[in-house]
Image (tube, helix red, strand yellow):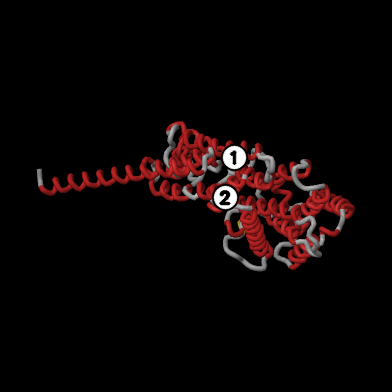
Amino acid sequence: MKVSEIRMLLSTSKKNEKRQKIKTSIGKVIIILFFIIASIFQGLAVISLFVFTVLYILSIFYGVNKDGAMREALRVMAFLPAFIIGMLYNQNQKEWVNQGIILSGIVVSLIGLITLSGLANIDGTLYQGRIQSTFHYANVTAIYLMMGIILSLKAMEKDKHTVCILHWHSLCIYLLTCGLILTYSRGVWIIFTLMNIFLLLSNKVLDKLHKGRYIFLLLLASMASFLMVSTAHSKWFWMILVVGAAISMISKHLGKWIYAVGSIGMTVGIIAAFFYKNEILDRITDISFGATEWKARILYYKGALKLIADYPFFGAGAMGWADLCEKYAGDYVKYVHNYLIQVSSDIGIIGVAFLIIFITSIFIKFFKNKKKDWYAFFIVVSILIHSLIDVDMHFQLIAVIFFIYSGIL
């Protein structure tokens, strides 16, 4: 045997030995961390989320997409700390998070509205007339604005005894709803409608007066959005937005009779708008299982299920779908557009089982609590439901918010 071959064999042996040591060290650290975390936070949710994270880390070693698996594992590693932070927050810290989402949501909405109005052309914030804003993806922008509306409602209810001429949280609801409508996100529109039906019919949140004001604000934002679409790129756009904002800010002082009369008037106006061509109405009438986007997603789901059948227990590794999608779905799409199916393709049915255990355990804990935070519940459920048809959980901010509010539950 040549000297060069001997050196190569020795080098390979050393590399293998080094890799084995790294794997052993990782294993030791994971086991130690497991017992530390499990002993401090003795809950099923924490343990299941910990195992879920470990499975993503391990997928780096066997996944078909090594680089993608590394990036995804690093991203997923933030979920457990976010959940624990949510568990440990005191009331003041929860309020800071709530206010942060509301204020940032207003900024996100205004950036989109500024671009839609034609006042400025901010790159990437508009796509085919749809507000994408800073997320550069309309559907995720919509779910973020919906979270802002939910938290503004909580703040509005909490401030019921505050004496103030201008009402800040009513303005927030108005601006966030305008932005949400103009994202044209049909999935979020449906989820938002269902949530509002529950809010308005349930006695869990909001008293009758607040429900009346909320209906008034929703109709005001809807009416303004219809008119703004028809006047985009003109001075009337901002006139409509500002007049609506002014009305929303004094809405606290209008009283239930004005809410009723105003709501009836705006409802008639919105119904009348159905007789005229409008992009919002076109989008509403296009809601069906035959929509082009939905047909494409069905193909992704079918392809991903075939992949899962080939890699059932531990998946193809994190982001394996991005490498194999053309083989299984006949088209390139980075994500499956269904988070549970995505997780199944990444780390198999074992991995998704731990995620389901985590979600189930936090909901059981929530319903067992006597003092329930229904607004945190709406946020978690909204993200979860929409992530079953879109890519919300692949936007790190949305994922972190999901786990923080899971911890708050």
- The answer to whether 174 appears left or right of 309 in the picture is right
- Camera-side residue: 407 or 256? 407
Give the amino acid at mark 1: Ile
Earlier-in-chain disc, 1 versus 2: 2
- Camera-side residue: 267 or 69? 69
User: Residue 235 location, x and y as percent?
Assistant: 74, 68
User: Residue 386 location, x and y as percent?
Assistant: 61, 44
Label 1 neighbourhood size at 10 Å, few (<14), some (14-19), many (20+)? many
Q: Which residue is mark 1?
A: 362
| Residue furthest out toward the front | 39
The relative height of residue 32 versus residue 279 in the rendered view (above or below) is above
Give the amino acid at mark 2: Leu
User: Residue 136 location, x and y as percent?
Assistant: 57, 56
Q: Which residue is mark 2?
A: 88
Of labels 1 and 2, the one closer to you:
2
- Secondary structure beneath label 2: helix
